[in-house]
Amino acid sequence: MDNTKYMIIDGNRVEFTDEKTMLAVILKAGIILPTFCYYSDLSVYGACRMCVVEDQWGGIIAACSTPPKHKAEIKTNTPKLHKHRKMILELLLASHCRDCTVCEKNGHCRLQMLAHRFGLTEVRFPNNNPHRVVDNSSTSIVRDSGKCILCGDCVRMCNEIQNVGAIDFAHRGSRMEISTAFCKDIADTDCVNCGQCAAVCPTGAITVKSDQSAVWKALYDPNKRVVAQIAPAVRVAIGEEFGFEPGENMLGKTVAALRRLGFDQVFDTSVGADLTIMEEAAELVEHLEEGDSQYPLFTSCCPAWVRYAETKHPELMKYVSTCKSPMEMFGAVLKTYYKEYDKKEKKETVSVAIMPCTAKKYEVSREEFKKNGVPDVDYVLTTLEVINMIKEIGILFDRIEGESSDMPFGLHSGAGEIFGATGGVTEAAVRRVVADKSPKALKDIEFMGFRGMEGVKVCEVEINGRMMRIGVVSGLGNAEELIEKIESGEEHFDFVEVMACPGGCVSGAGQPFSRKREKRMRAEGLYKNDKTAQIKRSDENPLMVNLYSDLLKNRTHELLHVHYKGGKEA
């Protein structure tokens, strides 16, 4: 007996197994239905009605919210459906801001793409949408509700995945909008600046705040030395906009492109990651020696997580590591290193970080990372911003040859590179603290369960004769669930790594738009880079020895650690 399940789609038989929606089965049939509110990583909302199909009786069904049915017959293209979709698009365009040519999302806007796809060349209806103020208060994102199509992707991301709840639907009917509580500026809410709302927004309603103009100004100033550091996650994503596969290592090409943009020196943030492991591993050993505690040592690499802890769980701040993030550690080192050169050459060093993350823009604005009002990192450019700059001056990224980063900070370990994937910080720390430094031990660590894109991973490893329980979490909603279990006594951990973005930094809101497959490939790319790295552990990096005996001598706490309000002393 044949138990194969199938649907009849546009007259063709299409089998299905574990597909949860008709939309997934239709995609399997080689048909891409138009969607706005559907995003595979979020719950089903079914509001935009663009993906509707017609059943055998002429009824209209939303494909994104309807489970597949055995022997169901549907049509995806009929006169009724075509007219329906074009009308929805025209109504959306009628109430939409028309500044497309200067919009941040121009060329990547889903509304723009579908309007072109359906051949809309005019809008018959007047724009009766009231003028809405642009919220520019955040250091990380810009909200323009005049471009919002009420798809709800940002609301579901903020509430369901990140558990932040900074934005939600307000009012009803024609007055409905996405708003903060009491219409506050987004900067005055509990927003953690993760930017995941901007990452899923299909139009220009929420975009990443740009620092490109300020960086161009610095690059064109002959009295400024502009140095850059590139985060590990950037190298495995930047190539996607230039025709390369996700996960391909584009560090060399990125270094070459930045030099052509005018940067004087280009470095790798993996050096900062090595410093972080040196300090955080020592802090972990100290935490273990202090004896049993209800709470673990939490990582501090992710500024969105730190902000979340400050606003939602201030009681945890004294258990958050005092280590600065790799970017801020390296930023402090670079500013200190160039201080004497600035005096001699009568120049000012401007430090720019190329990051996958929007929360880094918030981090550099914090007073904790400034000395006499001057930040250790002056500007943060996201991967997408650097892509825009490369395209702006006409660099053919696919044709330029790769170049190496600059000395004297040109050495880093593979452990520093894997920071960009969820679990990478933990694996790097374990490599540092385990007594066995043999190649076999390194291989064993690889299979301890730190790797993978799961939102929560629990692992155990023996350190100095004691079994240490470790939690690896990505996505703040997952972090909240783990924290609840820790506080109730249901779970106990010695060390917990938290990354705000699901999947880690490879999924940062400053990266090219991606889904689970691309994110996984980016993470695999980082582990592939680690595989071929000559130096596997942070403590084996000879640059660390030089730094600690010279520039960092008697200054490790000053340059590498931070004291947050409510946190433990650095």
Image: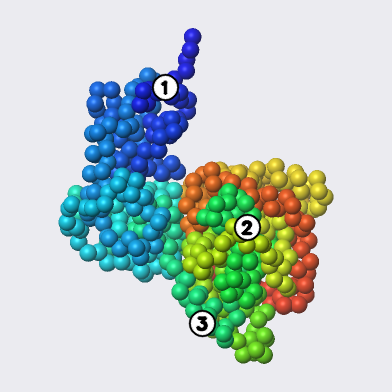
Give SS at disc 1. Answer: strand
| Three-letter code for the amino acid on which mark 3 is drawn | Gly
At which x and y percent is residue 260?
59, 71
Pick the front one: 216 or 19: 216
At which x and y percent is residue 347?
60, 87
Residue 151 position (above or below residue 362): above
Check disc 2: other Cα within 10 Å, few if <14, some if 14-19, many if 20+: many
Residue 372 position (above or below residue 166): below
Answer yes or no: is residue 364 visible. yes
| Three-letter code for the amino acid on which mark 2 is drawn | Met
Residue at 62 percent across and 57 percent down: it is: 250
Dividing the picture into quadrants, the one containing residue 449 is: top right
In screen coordinates, is 170 left or right of 513?
A: left
What quarter of the picture does the C terminus occupy?
Answer: bottom right
Q: Are marks 3 and 1 in contact (CB under 8 Å)?
A: no
Check disc 3: other Cα within 10 Å, few if <14, some if 14-19, many if 20+: few
Answer yes or no: is residue 568 visible. no
In the image, which is nearer the foreground, mark 2 or mark 3? 2
Tally the numbered discs: 3
Dividing the picture into quadrants, the one containing residue 261 is: bottom right
Dividing the picture into quadrants, the one containing residue 335 is: bottom right
Q: Which residue is mark 2?
A: 250
Q: CA–CA distance between discs 3 and 1?
A: 67 Å
Q: Which residue is mark 1?
A: 13
Q: Which residue is mark 3?
A: 373
Pointer 3 or 1: first along the chain: 1
Pointer 2 or 3: first along the chain: 2
Residue 50 position (above or below residue 58): below
Residue at 68 percent across and 65 percent down: it is: 403
At which x and y percent is residue 334?
64, 75
Pick the front one: 471 or 520: 520
